[in-house]
Each structure stands twice: as structure tokens, then as C-alpha cells.
Image (tube, rainbow, N blue to C red):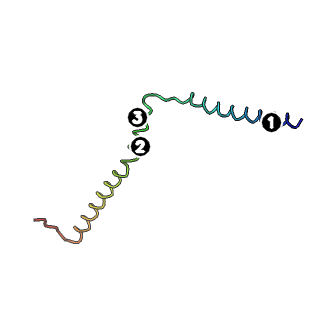
């Protein structure tokens, strides 16, 4: 009697596990993957790479403008020649 109980319990657990695994495999069926998907991923990653460079350029430009205004207010001119 005890052996049947354990066997039925193991069968039920294995059935639940296989159903979960089957549902996980079938979930990819509903994903809409086309030829454009890698391009979207590429563009997203490219933005993540280039946004810090754009931010760095904007901050450097603002710092240069602020520095030139401060030098103009002090009355100093820079002669490069």
C-alpha cells in the first residue's frame, strides 16, 4: 500500500514538472521574432554605448562656454600667437 502511494505521488510530481516544461517550450511560440528583431536589439545597444559619449561632449561644451564667460568677465584675453 505504501509503495503505491509513493509511486502515485512521484507520477503526479513528474506530470506536473513535464507540464511546466512543456508550457515553457510552448511559450516561445507566441513570441513574434522577425528579421527586424536583431536590428532593434542592435539599435538599442548602440544607443546605450553612444549616449555616454554624447553626454560627455555636451558637458565639455558647456564647461568650455562657462570657462570662456568667466575669463571674459575677469577681463583676461588669451593670445595664442
First in residue order: circle 3 vs circle 1: 1
From the image, which quarter does the C terminus lie in?
bottom left
Q: Residues within 10 Å of mark 2 (few under 14, many from 20)?
A: few
Residue that protrudes farthest toward the right in the picture: 1
Q: Residues within 10 Å of mark 3 (few under 14, many from 20)?
A: few
For the residue labelled by badge 3, is the local secondary structure a helix, a strand or a loop?
A: helix
- For mark 3, what is the residue? 39
Residue that protrudes farthest toward the front in the picture: 3
First in residue order: circle 3 vs circle 2: 3
User: 61 or 53, which is in the foreground?
Assistant: 53
Give the x, y percent position of residue 47: 39, 44
First in residue order: circle 2 vs circle 1: 1
Q: CA distance from mark 2 to mark 1?
A: 48 Å
- For mark 1, what is the residue? 9
Picture layout, residue 69 above or below residue 28: below
From the image, which quarter does the N terminus lie in?
top right
Give the x, y percent position of residue 9: 80, 36
User: 19 or 33, which is in the foreground?
Assistant: 19
- For mark 2, what is the residue? 45
Amino acid at each position: 500500500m505504501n509503495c503505491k502511494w509513493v509511486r502515485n505521488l512521484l507520477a503526479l510530481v513528474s506530470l506536473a514538472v513535464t507540464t511546466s516544461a512543456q508550457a515553457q517550450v510552448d511559450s516561445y511560440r507566441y513570441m513574434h521574432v522577425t528579421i527586424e528583431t536583431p536590428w532593434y536589439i542592435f539599435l538599442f545597444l548602440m544607443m546605450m554605448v553612444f549616449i555616454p559619449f554624447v553626454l560627455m561632449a555636451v558637458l565639455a561644451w558647456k564647461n568650455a562656454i562657462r570657462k570662456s564667460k568667466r575669463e571674459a568677465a575677469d577681463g583676461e584675453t588669451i593670445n595664442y600667437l
